[in-house]
Image: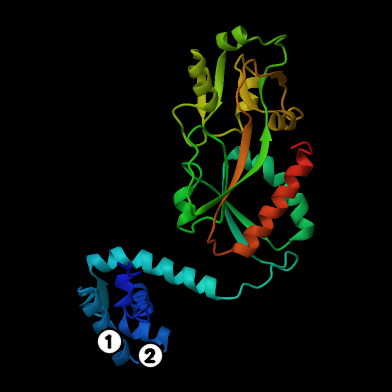
Amino acid sequence: MMNIMHPTLRRLDLNLLPVFDAIYRHRSVRMAADELAMSTSALSHALSRLRASLNDPLFYREGHRMCPSVYATQLAPSIASALKYLDQELTQQPEFDASRTTERLQIAITDFTAFCIFPALMHKLQHEAPGLSFELLYLPHTPALTELLAGEVDLALGFSTTEDIRHPELEEIGWFTDEYVVISHPGRARLTFEDYLAASHIVVTPWNEKQGVLDRQLEQMGYTRQIAIKTPSMLSAPFIVAESNLLMALPRFAAEKLMPATNIKIFSLPFEIRPFEIKIYSHKRSGKRSATNWLKSRLQTLAKEINPGQ
């Protein structure tokens, strides 16, 4: 027996969906009619047909406002998203001109991913794309899955965790890999595994994680370490290390960048762990595809310049 594709859509006039979306946004038949270049009587007739098709009043009048029903409120985000996606797909995308663009990209970051990427990136872009601007946003989790799917951010810069989430709507690029090292005050002469376990540590948990990557690895090996400070921000941590007996593990790239700014010493991490990796996440249906694709390309070139061997 043949399956009928999209049985609900087959009995619904899809031209009615922009009517629903306009009324929902404006809460007004007149304003919705003006936007759609329809008469108010034609729009009211279209609303009646939609009510009959969906078997729900959808909107009821309260004074001069059209208030949505519970069902309309549930439908509205999906209809708006579908219409936006179709409009983007059916509209020819202009070729991206980096030198002339005035796009503004919203990017989810941590202190560390911004520290690794943006100094070198802005050095490049001030010449290549002087009008491209950014809004950097801290988010309470990785990889900003909800915000990317909702279109609230254009890209997310996260790093690998043991609970990496993959979603079919998201594109994920491994941007940069590095080894972990340990920093301490300059007076330390050596760092064995026993020294490491005997010391106290500062741990950066940008999403307020209960357990960091290194602690999970140590737990699997049957060990724990003493954590004196957990902090969501990387910026103060190396300065605390320089003035105390605390140790801190971080990628070598960051440790070497920080050495001129603070009095620290670098040691190899005295146990094996998988490399640190920064990842770039984006939505496959980003509304700023041309700009985000261009930026991802530039970031991949930048990664090779920062670490030619990767």
Q: Which residue is mark 1?
A: 44
> x, y (%) of residue 310?
74, 37
Q: Is 160 left or right of 310, judged from the image as shown?
A: left
- Residue drawn at 60 percent across, 39 percent down: 111
Amino acid carrying mark 2 in the image: Met
The residue that mark 2 highlights is 38
Q: Residue furthest front?
A: 1
Does 264 appear above or below 288? Answer: above
Is disc 2 surrounded by few (<14), some (14 to 19) or many (20+) residues within 10 Å? some
Quadrant housing residue 274: top right
Residue 278 position within the rendered picture, expressed as x and y whole percent measured from the top left: 62, 39
Q: Is residue 192 left or right of residue 56?
A: right
Q: Is residue 31 above or below residue 242?
A: below
Return the x and y of residue 97 as percentages of the image width and height: 72, 68
State the image quarter where residue 114 is shown: top right
- The residue lying toward the viewer, choosing from 164 and 146, is 164
Tell which circle, 2 or 1, labels the residue nearer the N-terminal end.
Answer: 2
Whole-percent x, y for residue 195 in the image: 61, 8
Say if residue 8 shows up in the picture.
yes
